[in-house]
Image (cartoon, rainbow, N blue to C red):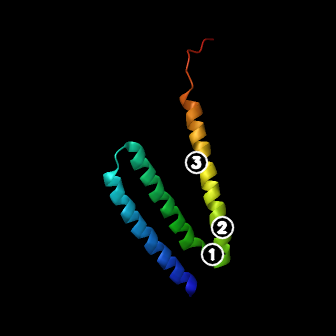
Amino acid sequence: MGGQCDKTAFVAFVVLLSLSLSSIVLLAQTQADEEEVVKSLLQAGKKAIIVDNIGFTEDESKGFWPVYDEFQQIKQKLKTKGRSRSSGITWGVMTP
């Protein structure tokens, strides 16, 4: 029973967070700011989907979310690193 209440509370939190963050998008000064807010919204949505579909116990949740968050951070660093490498590539003319 507590699990369903926790899910409902989390989904309500995500919805409120999404509404709050979406208003920040309107106030964002740069494209980078907007991109960061959109990423935050997407991440919150991913977490809500996971919570709704997996149904962790409290102990499982305590173990899962730190690992998930660390994985997401590593994945983002790798994406950023890959972008910086590819942006420095100079394409030349290939000759036979």
* Rendered view: 79 above or below 96: below
Identity of the amino acid at label 2? Answer: Phe
- For the residues marked 1 and 2, what is the alpha-carbon distance in whole angstroms? 9 Å
Alpha-carbon neighbours of circle 1 within 10 Å: few (<14), some, or many (≥20)? some
- Per the image, label 3 sits on a secondary structure element best described as helix
Q: Nearer the viewer, residue 15 or 24?
A: 24
The answer to which of marks 1 and 3 sits earlier in the sequence is 1
Residue at image location 56% in from the left, 17% down from the top: 92
- Check disc 2: other Cα within 10 Å, few if <14, some if 14-19, many if 20+: few
* Label 3 sits on residue: 76
* Callouts 1 and 2 close, C-beta under 8 Å: yes
> In the image, what residue occupies the spot 58% across and 48% down?
76
* Residue 87 disc label: none
Read off the residue under disc 2: 64
* Residue 9 x/y as whole percent: 48, 78
Residue that protrudes farthest toward the top in the picture: 96
Sequence-wise first label, 1 or 2: 1
Farthest residue to the left: give it: 26
Q: Which mark is residue 56?
A: 1
Q: Secondary structure at mark 2?
A: helix
* Residue 70, position as x, y percentages in the image: 64, 57
Specify the amino acid type for callout 1: Phe
Distance from disc 2 to disc 3, alpha carbons, whole Å, reads 18 Å
Mark 1–mark 3 Cα distance, whole angstroms, equals 25 Å
The quarter of the picture where the N terminus appears is bottom right
Three-letter amino acid code of the residue under disc 3: Gln
